[in-house]
Image (cartoon, rainbow, N blue to C red):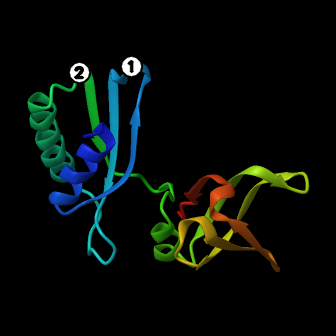
Amino acid sequence: MQLAELIEKIVVGLGFELVEFEASPRARLLRVFIDKPEGAKSGIQVDDCALVSSQLSRAFLVENVDYDRLEVSSPGMDRALVRPADYRRFAGADIQIKLRIPVGTQRNFSGVLEGLLNDALENAVVMLRVDDIRYEFSFENIDRARLIPKF
């Protein structure tokens, strides 16, 4: 079983959502970002991170995963949008998008996420309103997307 699959299985099994997983070169540092499923009344607490960290540490011991440090945390206020479901869940929120291939000469966009068209990953289209202009980006062309925190 791949490391990412193992982590996702454990995180989901504990009732959380795996937002992102990062491994440093040679997997010496493992960083896991978790969130509560859509509709949860509260965000991630320290106890949630401790629970996931404990379970992952035990699984890594059994699976002989060699690492030096494990970090489990919430995705933060500037949460990354990774899966198509994230674009549906956070429709109406302010986001920043960085494209792989620019539109014209522009690669970075900030605006209001209007949602996602099509469920199929290869045909998914992200809709973003910037001022009075509506952009549609292929999901596959999005390099990185994050929520813009409101204070």
The residue depicted at 16 percent of the width and 58 percent of the height is 13
Dot 2 falls on a residue whose secondary structure is loop
Q: Is residue 140 left or right of residue 58?
A: right
**For the point 30% across and 39% down, which residue is it?**
2
Q: Position of residue 57 (x, y in %)?
A: 14, 34
- Expressed as whole percent of the image width and height from the top left, the position of residue 124 reads 61, 71
Spatial CA span between label 1 and label 2? 9 Å
Q: Residue at x 22, y 59 (%)?
A: 12
Name the amino acid type tagged 2: Asp
Q: Which mark is residue 16?
A: none
Residue at 27% across, 58% down: 44
Label 2 neighbour load within 10 Å: few <14, some 14-19, many 20+: few
In the image, residue 3 above or below residue 119: above
Q: Nearer the viewer, residue 27 or 38?
A: 27
Q: Position of residue 10 (x, y in %)?
A: 18, 50
Tag 1's secondary structure? Answer: helix
**Quarter occupied by residue 64:** top left
Q: Is residue 87 above or below residue 31?
A: below
Spot occupied by residue 23 in the image (x, y as percentages of width and height): 39, 31
Hey, which quadrant is residue 141 in on the image? bottom right
Q: Which residue is mark 2?
A: 66
* Marks 1,2: beta carbons within 8 A: no
Check disc 1 and give the amino acid type. Arg
User: Which residue does the numbered mark 1 point to in the structure image?
Assistant: 26
The outermost residue toward the right is: 104
- Indicate the quadrant containing the N terminus: top left, top right, bottom left or bottom right: top left
Picture quadrant of residue 123? bottom right
Q: Decide which of tag 1 and tag 2 comes sooner along the chain.
A: 1
Label 1 environment density (alpha carbons within 10 Å; few <14, some 14–19, many ≥20): few
